[in-house]
Amino acid sequence: MSILIDRNSKVLVQGITGRQGGFHARLMMAYGTKVVGGVTPGKGGEWFEGVPVFDTMRAAVRTTNADTSLVTVPARFAPDAIIEAADAGIKLIICLTEHIPVADMMKVVAFCKSRGSRLIGPNCPGVMTPGQAKVGIIPAMVAEPGNVGVVSKSGTLTYEVGFAMKNAGIGISTIVGIGGDPVIGTTFVDVLEMFENDPETEKVALLGEIGGSAEIVAADYIKNAMTKPVAAFIAGRSAPPGKRMGHAGAIVDGGEGSADEKIQALEAAGARVANNPEEIPSLLA
Amino acid sequence: MKLHEYQSKFLFREFGIPIPNGQVAETPDEAQAIASQFGAAVVVKAQVHVGGRGKAGGVKLARDADEARRHAADILGMDIKGLVVQQVLIDPGADIQQEIYLAITNDRGAGRPLIMSSMEGGMDIEELNRSRPDAIIREHIDPILGLNDFQTTLIASAMSMPRAHWRSFGKILRGLYRCYIESDAELAEINPLVITGEGKLLAVDGKVIIDDNALFRQPKLAAQRDTSGEPESERLAREAGITYIKLDGQIGCMVNGAGLAMTTMDMTKLYGDADCIGPANFLDIGGGASPEQVAAALRIILSDEKVQCVLFNIFGGITRCDEVADGILTAYNEVKPNVPMVIRLQGTNASEGNAIISQAQIPTIISADTLTQAAQLAVAAVKERA
C-alpha cells in the first residue's frame, strides 16, 4: 500500500509533446509508471514513446481509462488544463507548473473540489511511491521503498532529506510534494490524514517553510488526530519578514507565517522538529 | 508588486471609487502649485513602500500653499526606513467624521477572496486585529460566483454602518471587488474610507499589491513599478531572471530550489549567528545550473560588497553533479571571485563532481560533504577574513 499513486495508476501527461513534459514522461516510464497517453491540443493522433497523444482530455480518458494526470504546461495554460482534467473525470491531478496567478488557482481549486478531483500542487515536484510509480519530477535516486511518509512544500529540500534517509537505510512509503504556492489543491493536513490511514506508513516526515498557516493547522491535526510519530523541519528561520523567498507562498506577512511560530506549534503538538534537515533521519530512527 | 498610495487611489478611481482630487509632486514648487489650486488646507504625503510613514514624519497637514511647499521640501529626500522619498501626494484635506477599514485579500488557507471591514478604521489592521478582533467583519467570496449583492448588505449591516450610507458603501465595495479581480490584486485596501461632514464616502488612503505572477497580463500596472528602492544586485538579478533577495550577512548563497536555498541560509545563521555571521542573500539558481547561469548568479552575489565567502549548495537530482562542477569551474574562471568559495554537491554523481572540484586545485575553493559541514566551513572562512 501507499497513498495517492501505485504501480496500477494510469497516468496521462498533459503537455507530453513539450520539452519538460516529454523529458519527464520518459523518466516516469523508465521508473515503471504506467503512462497510458498524453494530451497536446493539435497533436492528437501522434504517438509518444509508444503511447497515444490526444487533442483533448475527454478523448484521452475515454480511450485509456486513465485515473491520474500530470500537468506540465506553462502557467498561462495550466489553469485551463487542470479544469479540463477535472471536467474529464480525472480523480488525481498533479500540477508541476510554477507562476500561476493566485486568482486563477482560487477558481481552479474550487472547481476541482466541486468535481471530486484531488489536485496536488501547483508549483510542486509531484508524487512518488518508491519502487512503484512516480508522477512528476522527483528523481528516482532519492528514495527506496519503506514505511515513512514524506510531505513537503519544496522540491530539492525533499530530495535532500529523502536521500539522507536512504543513506541512513530508511525507506519511504510515498513522497508528496504539495507545492509552495499560497493557494494549493492539497494541504499538509490532507496528506497527514492519508498517511495516518495508510497501513504501510508508520512514521511521517513533514517539511514546511515560512508563509501562511498550513503548518499550524497541521500541528493541530497532529495533536488531535494522529497516532503516528512525526518528524519535521521548517525552512526560513533566517528569512526577513515581508520578503518573498522564491516560492510565491514563502513570505512572513503581517506577523503571520514565521518559522519560529510554526516550530513552536509543531513541538507543542508532539512532533520532533529538526534544526537541520540532516537530523531528520535520526529523528525517524 | 506594491503600488504607491497615489497609484492605488488613481486605480480605485477607475473603478468608480471616490477619492480626494489630489496630484503628485516631485519638487516643492510643484507641491505649492498644486496646493494653491485647491485654495484650502492640504495633506502632503510621502510616497514610499513602507508602513509607518506618518509616525516617521512623512505625512503633514498644510493650511496653505506656502506651508505645503515647506512640508514638501522637508519630506522630499527624507529617508524613511532606508527608502528616500522622491514623490509626495498633495491631497485636499477632508472633513473626517468617521474612519472605516475596507479591504479584499487572498485568504490562503481558505483558498478564497476575503473581505475585511470595520467601523474602526484608520489604524493598522494588524493592530486592530490584536486589540479588537471582534470589530473586524470577515466575509469570504466564492471565487467562481464573485461578490453577490446581498453580501454588501450583509457586511454593511454587520458593521453597524448607518443605513444612510449603505448604497454608496455597496457601490464602493463592488468597485473595490472589481478592482481586486481585474487588477489581479493580492490586496486591495482602503484605510481609511471616511464618512465626511457632508455625509459622503471617500477613500482617503489606499494600498494595492499586485500578484507578481499575473503581471504578464497587467502591462499597465507592471509599468508602474517603482524600482528606486531596489538594491542594485536585486535589479541585476531581476533582469537576469534569477530569483535573488539581498540580505545583510556575509555568506553569499547559491542553491538550487527555493526550499533548499532558505535552508542553506538558515544553516549559515545557525552556525554563524554567535559571531554575527549570516546569509548575504537568498538565491535560487533553478534547475540545470549551466555555466552561464552560475556565472551570472556569481556576479550578482559578488556585486554585494559585504560578501566574504560564497557557499554553493547544489542537490543533483536529474541534473548531474559532475556537470554542475564543470559549470562552477567555468564560471569561476570567468568571474575570478576574490573571496573563498565553499562547494557542496550532493545527489547524482556527487563523488565525480567533488573529484572535478578537488582536481582543479584552486586554493580558495573548499569542498564540503554535508550541509552542516558546508555551513561551518563558510562561517570559518568569513571569520578568517575578519
Image: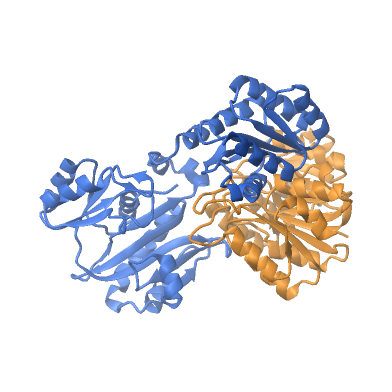
Residue B289 vs A97, above or below: the answer is above
Q: Please, which residue is most extreme toward the top here? A: B333
**Is B104 situated left or right of B284 in this image?**
left
- Residue A172 on image: x %, y %: 84, 54
- Who is closer to the viewer here, B187 or B88? B88
User: Tell me, what colour scheme is on the image?
Assistant: by chain
- Residue B45 on image: x %, y %: 26, 52
Rendered residue at 19%/66% (across/down): B95
- Number of callouts: 0
Kindly indicate which chain is depicted in orange in the rendered structure. Answer: A
Visual hue assigned to chain B: blue
Residue A267 placement: quadrant: bottom right
Residue B224 placement: quadrant: top left
Can residue B163 be spotted in the picture?
Answer: yes
Can residue A90 be spotted in the picture?
Answer: no
- Residue B211 on image: x %, y %: 49, 49
- Residue A72 on image: x %, y %: 69, 42
Rendered residue at 83%/43% (across/down): A140
- Who is closer to the viewer here, A37 or B23? B23
Residue B59 vs B281, above or below: the answer is below
Location of the C terminus of chain B by quadrant is top right
